[in-house]
Image (cartoon, rainbow, N blue to C red):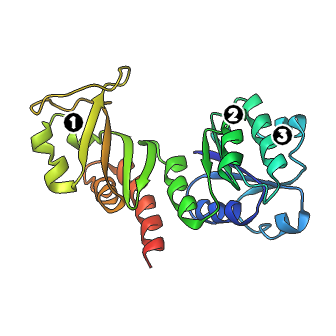
Amino acid sequence: MKQVAILGLSHFGKSVLDELLELKVEVIIVDKDRRVIDTYKDASAAAVVLDVLNVENLRKVLPESTDAVIIDMGDSIEASILATSYCAKLKIKTIIVKAETESHGEILELVGATKVVFPNKEAAKRITPLLLSSVLLNYFPVSGKLVIAELEIPRYLVGKTLVEAGIRSQYNLNLISLRGPDEEFGLFEPDMTFQAGDIGLFSGTDAALEHFIGYAPKDRAYKSIAEQFLNLFRRYKR
């Protein structure tokens, strides 16, 4: 099970937390304000009242198995920079931080943020799939609804050629590049055959990606993840 920590529960942190509480992911929430923590006392999340501006404090509450942290220190730019730096020192591989301005975001990247976002619900919607999925490896919003996604080829397409898979005709996605598990992305031939563990770089709309992820009739594990995605997409389409 994925393990995610949320440091600070301002608007953005709460938005992501509300998403995660509906899904199968272990959540740790940390905030120095007990009143904020008490709001989630009945939620299925571990809650800690703590000042995160101390690397040793964080070391005690964040397990080594933590997959990702979300940092939302409200409008305190200094606090978010320090918390990001501390998480980088703890070698947490995914550090997603809310920024107030472009310059703030640049500093966050310099001190260790792997992803900088800005405070709006659309950002929260697009980050959550990346945290939860074991097949969606990267997800880059480009403009409007267009995204570029890096994901593992589902098992039900293994053994099929690109034409047989119908990536463009059935899913309205474009396969930009392809690589094996231990290879770099490269060019491919139209008659190539998908192999187990292949990873594709796709471009398309959110809706097309939703359809591609949601169609896995012979792959229960993949379908379970897809159902989580579909629930998120439908919630924001209302």
Residue that extends furthest to the front in the rendered view of this protein: 103
- Is residue 158 visible in the rendered image? The answer is yes
Whole-angstrom CA distance, mark 2 to mark 3, is 20 Å
Ranked by sequence position, the earlier of labels 2 and 3 is: 3
Residue that extends furthest to the bottom in the rendered view of this protein: 238
Image quadrant in which the N terminus is located: top right
Taking the image as shown, residue 232 lies to the left or right of residue 188, namely: right
Among the 4 quarters of the image, the one containing residue 176: top left
- Tell me the mark number nearer the camera, choosing from 1 and 2: 2
Q: Amino acid at mark 2?
A: Leu
Whole-angstrom CA distance, mark 3 to mark 1, is 43 Å
Q: Amino acid at mark 3?
A: Leu
Q: Could you tell me which residue is drawn at 31 percent across and 44 percent down?
A: 202
Q: Secondary structure at mark 3?
A: helix
Mark 1 closeness class: few <14, some 14–19, many ≥20 residues within 10 Å:
some
- Is residue 69 visible in the rendered image? The answer is no
Ranked by sequence position, the earlier of labels 3 and 1 is: 3
The x, y position of residue 194, in whole percent, is 20, 32
- Tell me the mark number nearer the camera, choosing from 3 and 1: 3
The residue that mark 3 highlights is 58
- Tell me the mark number nearer the camera, choosing from 2 and 3: 2
Whole-angstrom CA distance, mark 1 to mark 2, is 40 Å
The residue that mark 1 highlights is 158
Taking the image as shown, residue 5 lies to the left or right of residue 231, namely: right
Taking the image as shown, residue 143 lies to the left or right of residue 118, namely: left
Q: Secondary structure at mark 2?
A: helix
Image quadrant in which the C terminus is located: bottom left
| Depth check, front residue: 79 or 163 | 79
Q: Could you tell me which residue is drawn at 70 percent across and 29 percent down?
A: 91
Q: Is residue 135 above or below residue 217?
A: above
